[in-house]
Image (cartoon, rainbow, N blue to C red):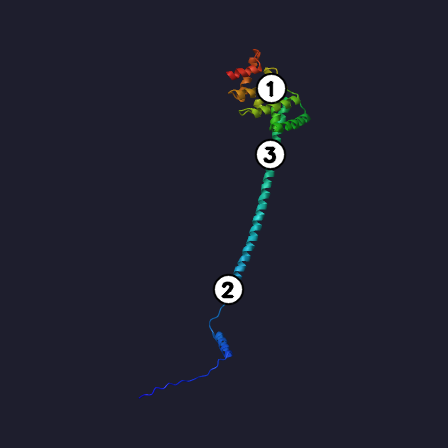
Amino acid sequence: MAISREYKVKIKATIDPSEISKQIDALGKNSKLKFDTGGIDAVGKSLTNTSNKMKGLGSIADSVFGKFNLWYGIAQISHQIYNAIGDVITNTVKLDTALTGLSKVSDMSKAQLQSFAKTVGETGVEVGRTTTEMVDAAAVFAQAGWSDPKELELLAKSASMFSNIADTQTSTAESAEFLIATMKAYNMTAEDTEHIMDAVNEVSNKYAVSSGDLASSIGRVASTLQQSGTSFEETLGLMTGA
């Protein structure tokens, strides 16, 4: 009969923490697993440099565009000044031509012409006309026989006003010719021009006839009708009913 025997061995052991720590340190020193942070640092530095360069380019761009805007602004101002000078020269030449034309049909001296141009220029502002247009209108009346500067100013203003209120395109010169024909046919004066304009304007507003048509027609028939004793107002009525 076999005998079963069990043997138990009791071992007493102690763990020295300092030894374990040394072994872990030794393992760490001998390990091939190393973390290289140099690459990450390099990437960070590269990004920082790129950012700084972009900021530098932004500053350069701002400077370039800022200078461009300044140059463009100066160019625009220079262009406007150039155009303004050109307009002044053009208008001066036109006015000089108009005054030369007026001098040929009036007895005004050079000083009187300059004073007249200043006066009618101020009047022209009231009726929306240039000094040249006012002088041209005055020249038409002067050629027709009017010579007094005050009358010429009033007549030029009336012609300009009629051009403004006419319901068809009528130049200042055409308005002047209409007023001249009417005044001469009915022995009217410069002071009567307001009544002439009011009468024509009222008829054109009430009836199917334009003030431009009346103005162009009255010049052709006024003299003949006046000789037959037909008044200005009756002439307008006949032309309206025709």
Q: Position of residue 27 (x, y in %)?
A: 48, 75
Q: Position of residue 238 (x, y in %)?
A: 53, 15
User: What residue is shown at x 59% (from left), y 43% (from top)?
Assistant: 73
Q: Provide the secondary structure element on which disc 1 rests.
A: helix
Q: Furthest residue to the right? A: 111
Q: Do the residues labelled 1 and 2 touch (CB within 8 Å)?
A: no
Mark 2: which amino acid? Answer: Ile
User: What residue is shown at x 60% (from left), y 41% (from top)?
Assistant: 77
Q: Is residue 233 visible?
A: yes
Residue hosting label 1: 195
Mark 1: which amino acid? Answer: His
Q: Residue 40 carries which label?
A: 2
Q: Picture quarter containing residue 90? A: top right
User: What residue is shown at x 54% (from left), y 57% (from top)?
Assistant: 51
Residue hosting label 3: 87
Local crowd size for mark 1, using a 10 Å CA cut-off: few (<14), some (14–19), many (≥20) = few
Q: Is residue 145 visible?
A: no
Q: Provide the secondary structure element on which disc 2 rests.
A: helix
